[in-house]
Structures are given as C-alpha cells and as structure tokens.
Image: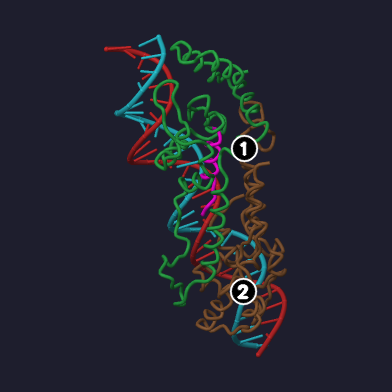
Chain colours: A brown, B green, C red, D cyan
Amino acid sequence: MRLSTKGRYSVTAMLDLAIHDKAGPVTLADISQCQGISLSYLEQLFARLRKSGLVKGVRGPGGGYRLARPASEISIAEIICSVDENVDVTHCKGEGNCNDGSKCLTHELWTALSVRLHEFLSGITLAQFVERPGIPELSMQRDKMIGRFVLAKKQAAAINQGVFNADNAVVNKELVR
Amino acid sequence: MRLSTKGRYSVTAMLDLAIHDKAGPVTLADISQCQGISLSYLEQLFARLRKSGLVKGVRGPGGGYRLARPASEISIAEIICSVDENVDVTHCKGEGNCNDGSKCLTHELWTALSVRLHEFLSGITLAQFVERPGIPELSMQRDKMIGRFVLAKKQAAAINQGVFNADNAVVNKELVR
DNA sequence: AAAATTCCTGACTAAATTAGTAGGTTAATA
DNA sequence: TATTAACCTACTAATTTAGTCAGGAATTTT
C-alpha cells in the first residue's frame, strides 16, 4: 500500500463530494478552484475513481460528479487503492526466492504491516469525517463565499461524535498476532 | 504523512537490523544483497536514519549498523518520518487562505486523517514484528544459507578475550544452532 | 605500521512518477 | 441551437526516486 499525493488529492476531492452530496453534483472545476489542483489532473484521477465505481459522472449543465454510494460505505482505503495501482513490493514477483533461494523474510514482515495499514484505512469512511462537529457549518460558510448555494438544515442536524472512536485502538492492539 | 518506497526500504532494512540485533552489526552490503537495493542508495537512507538517532554505525572490519535503541522503542512512524521529509500539504502554507479567504476545509480533514495514521504507525514497534512466532527461526535459517556465521564468529572472538563465562556460552550455543 | 573493511560524503545521472497542457468528443440542459 | 460539463487521448515539464561514481575517514585485523 502506497500513500502519495495522488491518493491525498483523491481523498480530499472525495471529501468535497461527500460534503455536498445532498446538494447535487460537484463540478471538477469547483474542486480545481477550491483545492488548487489543475482540472485535467483531476480528470485523470476521477477517471480511475469512476472505473472503480466510487463516483458517478453527470453530464451537461448542472452536472458534475457525485458519490456512487453513500459516504458511509466508502472507505479511505478504497479511494487510495483505486488511484494508486499497487506496485510489486517484493522484487521476487511472488516467486519467493529473493537472492538466496529461501523466502524473503523482511518482505513478508512488510507485507504484514501493509495489510494492517489497509485494514486500518478500510475502517475509516468518508461519512465519519463529514459528520464531525463543526464541519457542516464550515462547509456552508465556504460555499456561501464561493457562490454555491446548498443545503442548510439537514447537514447541520448531522452532528454526532468525532471521527475516530475506540475501534481503531482495538485494531492497533491486535496487530501482533 | 507520506508512504513511499523510500519509507518501505527503510522499514525493511530496520527490520533486518532488529532481527540480527543480538548477533552484532549488520553491513549495508548484506542488506543490499538480501533485499535487492543498491548499496549507495542504502547509504543515503541510513545517513538519515543515523541523523535521526535510530541507528548507530560501527566502523572497521566486523562493523556495520545496529539499532541505536531497543527494537521495542522504535516505531514504524519514526522510521518513515526520518527518511521522508514532510512536504507542505496545504498549498496555503498554513496561512489558512485557500483561494477563497476562508479556512480550507478538506485540507483540515486530510490533516486529521494524517494525524490518526501517524498515531497508528507510532503504536507499532519493530519489536512487535520481530518477536512474532517463527521469525527468529526463519532468520537464522536464512543467515545460514547466505553464509553469514556472525554469531559464531563473534562468540569465538569473545571467548578468546575471556568475556564469556560458561553460562553465556550455553545460551549462545543454542542461538547458533 | 599496513591492509582490510566499512562508514561517510557529495556530486552526478537515469528512470519513474507526478503534475499539468492541449485539443478534442459526447451528452444533457436551457 | 448554444452552452455546459463530463469524458477521452496524447503530449510535455517538473519533481522524485533510484542508482552510480569517486574519494575520503575511521577502525579493526594482520
């Protein structure tokens, strides 16, 4: 599992979509302006997100992109994996013979870590972020300044606990079998 | 927080050091051979690890690198951060005005995620990995095939100097075979 | 003391990835 | 029909990654 700027851009863009999900599609031009990423580069990223079934494109005026599924069913791990094609980590192409004929030990250890990391990010959904206290208000404030008019009440009502609860701590402790 | 090949190389190399910690220093040439990374590139990575106080270099014949602290006190997060200098994520240099004058919302959300990820990796130590069942045995098996008889060599040298008493000799004998 | 071994440093190069550009087409709306 | 915005392909520039080279400096063995 890799974590580069590509993944970061995608996650933040998806967050943008999640925040405005109920207000309709979000254009890439808006995201481009708000986050300082070039439009065409965004298009490349969204082409992958679309192929992975994470977003749906809506053409024509008033169109844009929206989440293909509820934000509560889209994990951070999914987003990152869809844009960062996973590279071969091992150098031995899974044949298991790294220079000395025996199984490569440290590579296996790294793989184990990578799996745990993936599990961790799989447990975090877009919804958990968007529903954090204060976020809906901030979102509205920004939209106002830009000129986007979006929903008001429903989001404001969606205030509950913070993003991360005790679940993650459990994952952490289970790391070493 | 970033997670690139640089971080992966460093973590796997540090795992190698942790595994052989009791047998003495590990040379970069060995790691280079075992993991298929170039020696000079490893030297670059280890220069940073050393500056971060994670490893200690031992010069001269029989030298190499070893952990500066017990493996139980070195986290994966530390290793990754020491080689991957953190880039400015926000594009607004912390001034808080991303294009529209208001605070950049999605960037903050990303930062929140990044913090949690860091916490997650900070909770994982090298020792937790190395001490998994079966690992020490595998490690020794591999060393045998490569032709490293580090422990035996060190032990012999130590006995010549009269360091080991009978009890230690027994303990180390078990380690070798 | 000499030789072998290994760390350490800096400058340089090739490959890969990232980021951005340009120029279109298709589909939906007004 | 004109406009909007997704969608697509190919190309380019910038940056990062990975590796190379050459030359020390420190330390142990012989």
**Please, which chain is the residue tagged with disc 2 on?**
A
Within the image, what quadrant is residue A166 found in? bottom right
Residue B22: give x, y in percent of width and height.
53, 26
Find disc 1 in the rendering and name its residue. A107
Residue A81 locus on image (x, y percent): 65, 55
Check the image and report above or below for D13 versus B36: below
Magenta stretch prevailing secondary structure: helix
Q: Which mark is residue B123?
A: none
Range covered by the magenta-colored residues: B1-16
**Residues under labels 2 and 1: Cα distance?**
39 Å
Q: Secondary structure at mark 1?
A: helix
**Element under label 2?**
helix
Badge 1 crowding class, 10 Å Cα cut-off, few under 14, some 14 to 19, many 20 or more, is many
Q: Is residue B139 magenta?
A: no
D19 sits left or right of A174 in the view: left
Q: Height in image: A91 above or below D7?
A: above
Q: Tag 1, which chain?
A: A
Mark 1: which amino acid? His
Return the residue nearer the eye: A95 or B103.
B103
| Quadrant assignment, res A77 | bottom right
Left or right of D25? Residue B55 is right
Q: Which mark is residue A19?
A: 2
Indicate whether A122 appears above or below A61.
above
Going 61% across and 54% down the picture, which residue do you hit?
A84
Which residue is painted at 68% across and 70% down in the image?
A: A67
User: The disc labelled 2 sits on which kind of residue?
Assistant: Ile
The image quadrant where one finds the C terminus of chain B is: top right
